[in-house]
Image (spheres, helix red, strand yellow):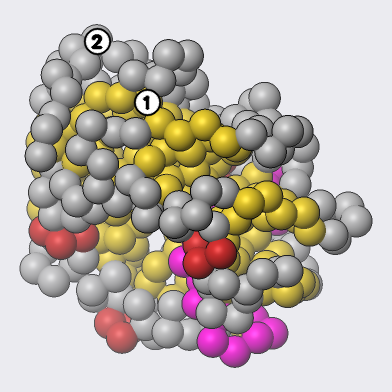
Amino acid sequence: MRSCALLAAVLLPLTAFAGGSNYGVAPGTRDFSAKISEWPVPTPKFARDPAIGPDGNIYITVMFADRIARFDTKTHKFNEWNLPEGTRPHGLLVDASGKVWYTGNGKGVIGELDPATGKVVEHRPPSGGNPHTIVLDGSGAIWFTSQSGYVGRLERPGGKITEYRMSGGPYGIALDKLGKVWVCRMGADKMGIIDTKTGKVSELYMGPGTMPRRVAAAPDGSFWVMLYGVGKVAHIDPSAAKVVKEYEMPAGDRGGPYAITVDGAGRVLVSEIQKDTVTMLDPRTEQLQVFMLPSSNEGIRKAIVDAQGRLWYMGSHSGKLGVIE
């Protein structure tokens, strides 16, 4: 695999920790009434990974149909855009201008969709591979993981892509307030840490069989990591690069904790993919609240909190977009 030279002086200004994961819109908070609504997506071909646009609407990738869909949160109607055949879009985010950025898992590209025109621009990392999760830093650059063995940074404007080699199948990714990028190395039971000031890559071992899958940043700058292999969520202090505490999820080691996000009050919201539930952990009280979802076999792989504090999730198996408010 080829790798570009590492950037030596990339500074990350404070970012908007949207839904706890750096997507450009700061998350709100609310007292949940446990009202849950769901809408079937027009093309239920493994739709996944919701993201919030600056217009407050929800965007999703439709992986097996090569499409991006948008849900209007006021009219409750969907629009769809076609992507090049074989793209297999996975993760996405929407920037401040309304452009949709996505990982083209099938073509080995980072894609850019202009919803106003339907025009698609593809950016191809030197190593190709299978780009996975995507986030935005405070300078407007795009960071993404590739399970084929690297983490990438796409500069804007210009489109230059820098790669950082990383083993263990890089998966979830988030940015801290210290200028470092944190990556779930699911196949290595480790968190990878990229210091963007020096280009140095280090790691934090999470324990045998933990399989860290997704990570979310809290408003206080700490991290929450789903330990898929052992049914726990871990709280990390990034300044000390250590695990503060681990919490058992309700379904235990067979629940498959997957999606994770954090609201504006620092409450942690997680899904266990083997169960049709969303669990909220309040770190201040260490109390758990479990929300039972209306559909069976949801298959939630990603969830995010909007500016109003509502939790949006996409059931990849059920083909339904849902919200808890």
Left or right placement of residue 144 versus residue 69 in this view:
left
Picture quadrant where residue 44 is located: bottom right
Most frequent secondary structure within the magenta stretch? loop
Q: Residues within 10 Å of mark 2 (few under 14, many from 20)?
A: few
Residue at x-position 21% and y-position 60%:
186
Query: Which mark is on residue 256?
Result: none
Q: Quadrant of the C terminus?
A: bottom right
Residue 270, image x, y percentages: 48, 66
Name the foreground residue: 74 vs 244: 74
Left or right placement of residue 105 versus residue 29 in this view:
left
- SS type, badge 1: strand
Picture quadrant where residue 35 is located: bottom right
Relative to residue 275, is residue 211 depicted above or below?
Answer: above
- SS type, badge 2: loop
The kind of residue tagged 2 is Ala
**Residue to which mark 2 is pinned:** 9
Q: Which residues are magenta?
A: 293-310
In the rendered image, is residue 292 in sight?
yes
**Residue to which mark 1 is pinned:** 154
